Image (spheres, grey):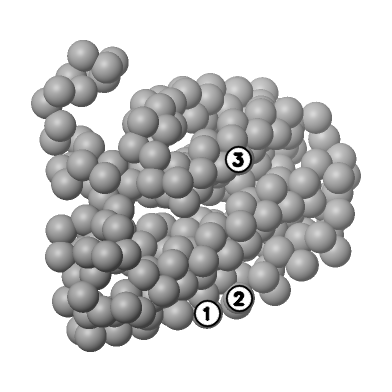
Amino acid sequence: MHKLAEHIVSGYDDDLNQLTTTLSELGALVEAMTSDSVKSIKKRDSELAKQVITMDKRANLLQEQIDEDALRLMALRHPMATDLRRTIGAIRSANDLERVGDLAEGIARRAISINDEDKIGLAKGVYRIGKLVKSQLSGALDALLREDADKALQVWLADEDVDEMYNAIFRELLTYMMGDPRTITACASFLFVAKNLERIGDHATNICESVYFTVHGKQLVNDESLDGLRSY
Protein backbone atom coordinates (compact mmCIF):
# COMPACT_ATOMS: atom_id res chain seq x y z
CA MET A 1 0.00 0.00 0.00
CA HIS A 2 1.31 3.49 -0.85
CA LYS A 3 2.58 5.67 1.94
CA LEU A 4 0.67 8.84 2.72
CA ALA A 5 3.53 10.96 1.37
CA GLU A 6 3.10 9.40 -2.03
CA HIS A 7 -0.46 10.66 -2.36
CA ILE A 8 -0.92 14.02 -4.02
CA VAL A 9 -4.32 14.54 -2.41
CA SER A 10 -4.21 14.60 1.39
CA GLY A 11 -7.68 13.06 1.76
CA TYR A 12 -6.89 10.09 -0.44
CA ASP A 13 -5.97 7.72 2.38
CA ASP A 14 -9.12 8.69 4.27
CA ASP A 15 -11.22 7.72 1.25
CA LEU A 16 -9.47 4.37 0.93
CA ASN A 17 -9.75 3.69 4.67
CA GLN A 18 -13.45 4.52 4.63
CA LEU A 19 -13.92 2.08 1.78
CA THR A 20 -12.17 -0.61 3.81
CA THR A 21 -14.26 0.20 6.88
CA THR A 22 -17.53 -0.21 5.00
CA LEU A 23 -16.24 -3.39 3.39
CA SER A 24 -15.37 -4.70 6.85
CA GLU A 25 -18.88 -3.92 8.10
CA LEU A 26 -20.45 -5.71 5.15
CA GLY A 27 -18.17 -8.71 5.65
CA ALA A 28 -19.01 -8.99 9.35
CA LEU A 29 -22.71 -8.72 8.58
CA VAL A 30 -22.86 -11.48 5.95
CA GLU A 31 -20.58 -13.69 8.04
CA ALA A 32 -23.11 -13.40 10.88
CA MET A 33 -25.96 -14.05 8.45
CA THR A 34 -24.29 -17.23 7.22
CA SER A 35 -23.61 -18.49 10.73
CA ASP A 36 -27.09 -17.66 12.02
CA SER A 37 -28.87 -19.16 9.02
CA VAL A 38 -27.26 -22.54 9.70
CA LYS A 39 -27.78 -22.15 13.44
CA SER A 40 -31.48 -21.46 12.86
CA ILE A 41 -31.79 -24.95 11.37
CA LYS A 42 -29.64 -26.66 13.95
CA LYS A 43 -31.49 -25.01 16.85
CA ARG A 44 -34.86 -25.09 15.03
CA ASP A 45 -35.06 -21.36 15.73
CA SER A 46 -37.35 -19.73 13.18
CA GLU A 47 -37.16 -16.36 14.94
CA LEU A 48 -33.42 -16.32 14.33
CA ALA A 49 -34.07 -17.20 10.69
CA LYS A 50 -36.43 -14.22 10.41
CA GLN A 51 -33.70 -11.96 11.81
CA VAL A 52 -31.33 -13.16 9.10
CA ILE A 53 -33.92 -12.30 6.47
CA THR A 54 -34.27 -8.74 7.77
CA MET A 55 -30.47 -8.30 7.80
CA ASP A 56 -30.26 -8.74 4.02
CA LYS A 57 -31.61 -5.25 3.39
CA ARG A 58 -28.69 -3.76 5.34
CA ALA A 59 -26.24 -5.89 3.34
CA ASN A 60 -27.69 -4.56 0.08
CA LEU A 61 -27.38 -0.97 1.26
CA LEU A 62 -23.75 -1.45 2.30
CA GLN A 63 -22.90 -2.98 -1.07
CA GLU A 64 -24.49 -0.04 -2.85
CA GLN A 65 -22.56 2.38 -0.65
CA ILE A 66 -19.26 0.67 -1.46
CA ASP A 67 -20.01 0.85 -5.18
CA GLU A 68 -20.85 4.55 -4.96
CA ASP A 69 -17.82 5.40 -2.81
CA ALA A 70 -15.45 3.42 -5.02
CA LEU A 71 -16.73 4.98 -8.24
CA ARG A 72 -16.55 8.45 -6.75
CA LEU A 73 -12.99 7.76 -5.57
CA MET A 74 -11.94 6.70 -9.06
CA ALA A 75 -13.60 9.72 -10.64
CA LEU A 76 -12.14 12.29 -8.26
CA ARG A 77 -8.80 10.78 -7.18
CA HIS A 78 -7.70 8.90 -10.31
CA PRO A 79 -5.98 6.09 -8.39
CA MET A 80 -3.02 4.32 -9.95
CA ALA A 81 -1.35 0.92 -9.60
CA THR A 82 -2.07 -0.78 -6.24
CA ASP A 83 -4.61 1.84 -5.17
CA LEU A 84 -6.59 1.30 -8.35
CA ARG A 85 -6.50 -2.46 -7.79
CA ARG A 86 -7.62 -1.95 -4.18
CA THR A 87 -10.59 0.08 -5.36
CA ILE A 88 -11.56 -2.42 -8.05
CA GLY A 89 -11.03 -5.24 -5.57
CA ALA A 90 -13.39 -3.56 -3.10
CA ILE A 91 -16.13 -3.38 -5.73
CA ARG A 92 -15.66 -7.02 -6.71
CA SER A 93 -15.52 -8.24 -3.12
CA ALA A 94 -18.57 -6.21 -2.11
CA ASN A 95 -20.53 -7.81 -4.92
CA ASP A 96 -19.49 -11.28 -3.74
CA LEU A 97 -20.37 -10.43 -0.16
CA GLU A 98 -23.79 -9.16 -1.18
CA ARG A 99 -24.41 -12.46 -2.94
CA VAL A 100 -23.35 -14.31 0.22
CA GLY A 101 -26.00 -12.33 2.06
CA ASP A 102 -28.61 -13.34 -0.53
CA LEU A 103 -27.66 -17.00 -0.18
CA ALA A 104 -27.78 -16.83 3.62
CA GLU A 105 -31.22 -15.23 3.37
CA GLY A 106 -32.31 -18.10 1.14
CA ILE A 107 -31.09 -20.61 3.73
CA ALA A 108 -32.99 -18.75 6.45
CA ARG A 109 -36.21 -18.82 4.44
CA ARG A 110 -35.81 -22.55 3.87
CA ALA A 111 -35.03 -22.99 7.59
CA ILE A 112 -38.47 -21.68 8.50
CA SER A 113 -40.05 -24.37 6.32
CA ILE A 114 -37.75 -27.08 7.68
CA ASN A 115 -38.51 -26.09 11.27
CA ASP A 116 -42.24 -26.45 10.65
CA GLU A 117 -41.76 -30.14 9.84
CA ASP A 118 -41.02 -33.00 12.23
CA LYS A 119 -37.35 -33.24 13.16
CA ILE A 120 -35.44 -35.78 11.11
CA GLY A 121 -31.86 -37.01 11.27
CA LEU A 122 -30.71 -35.82 7.88
CA ALA A 123 -29.00 -32.57 8.80
CA LYS A 124 -25.60 -33.66 10.11
CA GLY A 125 -23.94 -33.32 6.72
CA VAL A 126 -25.41 -29.84 6.29
CA TYR A 127 -24.01 -28.81 9.68
CA ARG A 128 -20.58 -30.11 8.67
CA ILE A 129 -20.47 -28.22 5.39
CA GLY A 130 -21.85 -25.16 7.19
CA LYS A 131 -18.95 -25.24 9.64
CA LEU A 132 -16.42 -25.65 6.84
CA VAL A 133 -17.90 -22.83 4.74
CA LYS A 134 -18.07 -20.48 7.72
CA SER A 135 -14.36 -21.12 8.31
CA GLN A 136 -13.62 -20.52 4.61
CA LEU A 137 -15.60 -17.27 4.58
CA SER A 138 -13.90 -16.08 7.77
CA GLY A 139 -10.48 -16.81 6.26
CA ALA A 140 -11.36 -14.97 3.05
CA LEU A 141 -12.53 -11.91 5.00
CA ASP A 142 -9.37 -11.94 7.10
CA ALA A 143 -7.25 -12.08 3.93
CA LEU A 144 -9.31 -9.26 2.41
CA LEU A 145 -8.99 -6.85 5.31
CA ARG A 146 -5.29 -7.61 5.84
CA GLU A 147 -4.53 -7.71 2.10
CA ASP A 148 -2.84 -11.03 2.82
CA ALA A 149 -2.25 -12.83 -0.47
CA ASP A 150 -0.72 -15.88 1.21
CA LYS A 151 -3.82 -16.34 3.37
CA ALA A 152 -6.02 -15.81 0.32
CA LEU A 153 -4.14 -18.53 -1.55
CA GLN A 154 -4.51 -20.92 1.40
CA VAL A 155 -8.28 -20.42 1.55
CA TRP A 156 -8.61 -20.62 -2.23
CA LEU A 157 -6.84 -23.98 -2.38
CA ALA A 158 -9.13 -25.37 0.35
CA ASP A 159 -12.25 -24.90 -1.79
CA GLU A 160 -11.96 -28.44 -3.10
CA ASP A 161 -12.80 -29.69 0.41
CA VAL A 162 -16.14 -27.87 0.25
CA ASP A 163 -16.90 -29.27 -3.19
CA GLU A 164 -16.10 -32.82 -2.08
CA MET A 165 -18.28 -32.47 1.02
CA TYR A 166 -21.20 -31.14 -1.02
CA ASN A 167 -20.93 -34.08 -3.43
CA ALA A 168 -20.94 -36.48 -0.47
CA ILE A 169 -24.05 -34.80 1.00
CA PHE A 170 -25.77 -34.96 -2.39
CA ARG A 171 -25.15 -38.69 -2.64
CA GLU A 172 -26.26 -39.27 0.94
CA LEU A 173 -29.53 -37.39 0.58
CA LEU A 174 -30.23 -38.99 -2.80
CA THR A 175 -29.87 -42.39 -1.15
CA TYR A 176 -32.38 -41.38 1.54
CA MET A 177 -34.89 -40.22 -1.06
CA MET A 178 -34.57 -43.43 -3.07
CA GLY A 179 -34.91 -45.56 0.05
CA ASP A 180 -37.91 -43.73 1.51
CA PRO A 181 -39.97 -41.45 -0.74
CA ARG A 182 -41.53 -39.91 2.37
CA THR A 183 -38.23 -38.07 2.93
CA ILE A 184 -38.17 -36.42 -0.50
CA THR A 185 -39.49 -33.04 0.67
CA ALA A 186 -37.11 -32.85 3.62
CA CYS A 187 -34.14 -34.03 1.56
CA ALA A 188 -34.88 -31.49 -1.15
CA SER A 189 -34.83 -28.72 1.47
CA PHE A 190 -31.51 -29.87 2.88
CA LEU A 191 -30.06 -30.14 -0.63
CA PHE A 192 -31.09 -26.55 -1.24
CA VAL A 193 -29.33 -25.47 1.96
CA ALA A 194 -26.19 -27.47 1.13
CA LYS A 195 -26.06 -26.01 -2.38
CA ASN A 196 -26.37 -22.47 -1.05
CA LEU A 197 -23.53 -23.15 1.37
CA GLU A 198 -21.40 -24.54 -1.46
CA ARG A 199 -22.09 -21.38 -3.44
CA ILE A 200 -21.10 -19.24 -0.45
CA GLY A 201 -17.80 -21.11 -0.55
CA ASP A 202 -17.45 -20.19 -4.22
CA HIS A 203 -17.91 -16.51 -3.40
CA ALA A 204 -15.29 -16.82 -0.65
CA THR A 205 -12.82 -18.09 -3.25
CA ASN A 206 -13.77 -15.18 -5.53
CA ILE A 207 -12.85 -12.80 -2.72
CA CYS A 208 -9.51 -14.58 -2.37
CA GLU A 209 -8.88 -14.10 -6.08
CA SER A 210 -9.61 -10.37 -5.70
CA VAL A 211 -7.15 -10.14 -2.81
CA TYR A 212 -4.45 -11.91 -4.81
CA PHE A 213 -5.01 -9.58 -7.76
CA THR A 214 -4.87 -6.52 -5.52
CA VAL A 215 -1.55 -7.53 -4.01
CA HIS A 216 0.22 -9.07 -7.02
CA GLY A 217 -1.45 -7.43 -9.99
CA LYS A 218 -2.21 -10.72 -11.71
CA GLN A 219 -5.05 -13.20 -11.67
CA LEU A 220 -4.61 -16.06 -9.24
CA VAL A 221 -6.10 -18.62 -11.63
CA ASN A 222 -3.58 -17.63 -14.33
CA ASP A 223 -0.47 -17.50 -12.12
CA GLU A 224 1.73 -20.23 -13.61
CA SER A 225 4.04 -20.12 -10.58
CA LEU A 226 1.25 -21.81 -8.56
CA ASP A 227 0.79 -24.80 -10.87
CA GLY A 228 2.59 -27.11 -8.47
CA LEU A 229 0.13 -26.26 -5.69
CA ARG A 230 -2.96 -27.17 -7.66
CA SER A 231 -4.35 -30.66 -7.51
CA TYR A 232 -6.62 -30.31 -10.52
For the C terminus, the quadrant is top left
**Badge 3: residue crowd in 10 Å (few <14, some 14–19, many ≥20):** many
* Horizontal and vertical percent position of residue 81: 15, 58
- Residue shown at the point (42%, 33%) measured from the top left: 151
State yes or no: discs 1 and 2 in contact (Cβ < 8 Å).
yes
How much space separates mark 1 and mark 2, taking CA atoms?
A: 5 Å
Left or right placement of residue 159 versus residue 84 in this view: right
- The residue that label 2 is drawn on is 58
Residue linked to disc 1: 61
Q: Earlier in the sequence, mark 3 or mark 1?
A: 1
Q: Which residue sits at x=59%, y=35%?
A: 135
Mark 3 or mark 2, which is nearer the start of the sequence? 2
Which element carries disc 1, helix, strand or loop? Answer: helix
Callout 2 crowding tier (Cα within 10 Å): few <14, some 14–19, many ≥20: some
Left or right of residue 196: residue 159: left
Q: Which residue is mark 3?
A: 134
Image-quadrant location for residue 116: bottom right
Q: Could you tell me how far apart the alpha carbons at marks 2 and 3 are, in whole angstroms?
A: 20 Å
> Percent from the top left, x then y, of residue 187?
66, 39
> Rounded to the nearest whole Å, what is the CA distance between mark 3 and mark 1?
23 Å
| Badge 1 amino acid | Leu
> Residue 183 falls in which quadrant of the image?
top right
Say if mark 2 contacts mark 3, CB within 8 Å: no
The structure residue drawn at horizontal position 70% and vertical position 73%, both measured from the top left corner, is: 54
